Amino acid sequence: MKLFCRSISWVGIAFISAGIAVSAQAGILKASPAQPSGFLVNPQEMRADAGRSPFDRVWRNGSPRAWARVQRFDRIVILPVNTAYLNGTAKQRAEAEKMAAYMRERFQREFARGGQYRVVRQPGARTLVLELALVEWKPTNIAGNVVSTGAGVVVPGANLIGSAFTHGNIAFEAKIRNGETGELLSQYADRQRDKLTLFSFRDYSSTAHNRKAIDDWARQMEELATTPSDHRVAGAMRVTLNPF
């Protein structure tokens, strides 16, 4: 009996290891960058900047004068999130609009919490403008995750393998402008997939993982906007033991 239990344990470990490997291969640990949607300006000039930003691609205005003009800005407008570049059925678009509303509210809340910029409704004097676009959205496959969880009960780690095929994903693009002149200051693009975990209640909601990605983006964007250019903003963990 002990030998049998020990064998099951090793099988579980093998499947967990295999699940992580398959998930990594499928892009779960870090999603591949999304193709530019048309929302950004000259996206071919954007590059990864791991020393500063956790996002897939960034661009920063290289003119010192452009940044000197906004040095004393203390307000920010976060415009309604653009969903014009999303495809899908009418039902999917209605759900995406809800996600876009959540995204704007979450970014507003994070900047308000940070305190360096006062969140206002209209561009004007001493105001930055943050333009956001939701350019890709795929809900989590709840039914698939139910099946994967059942398989994980029988064979530990099988649910990790299943997650490679049931995950959702989400991608955004952003532009920050001088609210007085309209001058483009920086651009960002990132794409995320559901976090990898042995078990998560988020697996049983079509939007919970994507909302968590938005939460991470809001925090990261606020930190990028309020820290020196040599400060590194850390990315979110792609593997988590937190089930909530």
Image (tube, grey):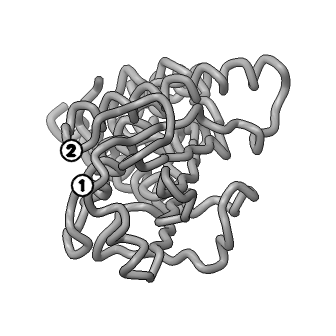
Secondary element type, mark 1 = helix
Task: Name which residue type carries label 1.
Answer: Thr
Secondary element type, mark 2 = loop
Viewer-closest of 130 and 74: 74
On screen, 162 above or below 19? above
Q: What quarter of the picture does the N terminus occupy?
A: top left
Residue occupying the far front of the picture: 125
Q: Which residue is mark 2?
A: 116
Which quadrant of the figure has residue 45? bottom right
Q: Which residue is mark 1?
A: 226
On screen, 229 above or below 205? below
| Contact? badges 2 and 1 (CB < 8 Å) | yes
Viewer-closest of 81 and 97: 81
Question: At 45% across and 38% down in the image, what residue appears?
Answer: 77
Viewer-closest of 138 and 197: 138
**Where residue 110 sits: x, y (%)?**
30, 34
Q: Residues within 10 Å of mark 2 (few under 14, many from 20)?
A: some
Taking the image as drawn, is residue 88 in sight? yes
Task: Name which residue type carries label 2.
Answer: Gln
Separation (CA) of disc 2 from disc 1: 7 Å
On screen, 230 above or below 162? below
**Where residue 43 sits: x, y (%)?**
65, 71
Question: At 66% across and 24% down in the image, what residue appears?
Answer: 97
Which quadrant of the figure has residue 196? top left
Question: At 48% across and 47% down in the image, what residue appears?
Answer: 129
Mark number displayed over residue 87: none
